Image (spheres, rainbow, N blue to C red):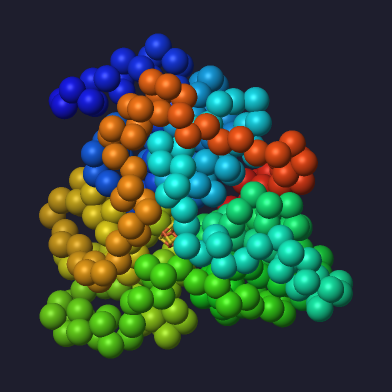
Amino acid sequence: MSTVAERIRQLKMEKNAVILAHNYTSADVQDIADYVGDSLGLSVKAAGSDADVIVFCGVSFMGETAKILSPGKRVLLPEPEARCAMASMCNAEQIRGARLRNPGAAVVGYVNSTAESKCEMDVCCTSSNAVSVVDSLSQKDVVFVPDMNLGAYVASKTDKNVILWDGFCPVHQSITVRQVGAMKEKHPGAKILAHPECRPEVLALADGIGSTEKILAMAGETGSEDVIVLTEVGMRHRLEALYGQKRFHFPVQAVCMTMKMIELESIANALESFSGEVVLDPDVLKGAYSPVRKMIGLKD
Ligand code: 13P
Ligand code: SF4
């Protein structure tokens, strides 16, 4: 075990902290975490934790969501400047504008959004419960922000009229039909598993679609030895640990650079000096609580 990992374990005990990490973080970060998972699983853990301090290894909206769910706890982001590019593709004012343009429509927001934006939403969702969240609403019209690809995927699974935003995840958006075709040519027997943040035409090629945690489950269920995984490469770590006999193939460019900013040193520093603490305006904490709380009650 490296010295910095030892330091983290010691500090974690001293400060009664829990370390949560998203499936896209680096392998050494995942290895030091108490829980590694998708956005829904991480939010549930953050809401139910009895630790005094939550160290959230992920991009900033994840730490904010943990703070919204556990406002009495100290939530630390080891790299507070690590942001999700998609989250900045819509803001609170734009959502208010969309409400005016679509009177009577519900606003469903992907958790990949800022805390201020969440205040304007009726309910939040993650990629693992987006369809059931939309289906649970009484309104027929639903404005879905900010991910147009997840929104289009939801629209394909529900009778609701889903009004799409024009946001996207650059990592998933970069995966093309041509690239997937080339991967399939190289590994003809491979099954294709994809995240719903991919473009609709890419999802049309997939044998299975789901959140990062669902992709992990589907990779175990498939009989194929070769699996093409259309999401971020951080997933390789758990996939290989769980299913060592299989071969996983990722698009080379599928790297979320901000997730990779988090390193063991950043975790140790955050724990040592309580740096990177998530501080939200009390009105924002209050306004975002209901949409986020509803989100963790529903699963697809
Ligand atoms: P999930 O792990 O919830 O599928 O989310 C993917 C993602 O892009 C997180 O930013
Ligand atoms: Fe945001 Fe995409 Fe990175 Fe996920 S992979 S954090 S959606 S930029």
Residue 36 versus residue 219 in the image, above or below: above
Q: Is residue 226 left or right of residue 57?
A: left
Q: Position of residue 139 (x, y in %)?
A: 81, 69
Q: Position of residue 272 (x, y in %)?
A: 38, 20
Picture residue at 44% right of the left edge, 79% below the top? 199
Q: Position of residue 22 (x, y in %)?
A: 40, 46
Q: Is residue 166 left or right of residue 54?
A: right
- Asked which quadrant contains residue 211, the reply is bottom left
- Between residues 58 and 279, which one lies in front from this camera angle? 279
- Between residues 101 and 127, which one lies in front from this camera angle? 101
- Asked which quadrant contains residue 257, the reply is bottom left
- Asked which quadrant contains residue 72, the reply is top right
- Between residues 192 and 173, which one lies in front from this camera angle? 173
Looking at the image, can residue 235 be seen?
no
Residue 20 versus residue 14 in the image, above or below: below
Q: Is residue 37 left or right of residue 129?
A: left
Picture residue at 72% right of the left edge, 44% below the top? 284
Quick one: quadrant of the C terminus?
bottom right
Q: Is residue 5 left or right of residue 14?
A: left
Q: Position of residue 13 (x, y in %)?
A: 38, 14
- Between residues 277 and 202, which one lies in front from this camera angle? 277
Picture residue at 24% right of the left edge, 26% below the top? 5
Picture residue at 68% right of the left edge, 57% below the top? 117
Quick one: quadrant of the N terminus?
top left
Looking at the image, can residue 205 be seen?
yes
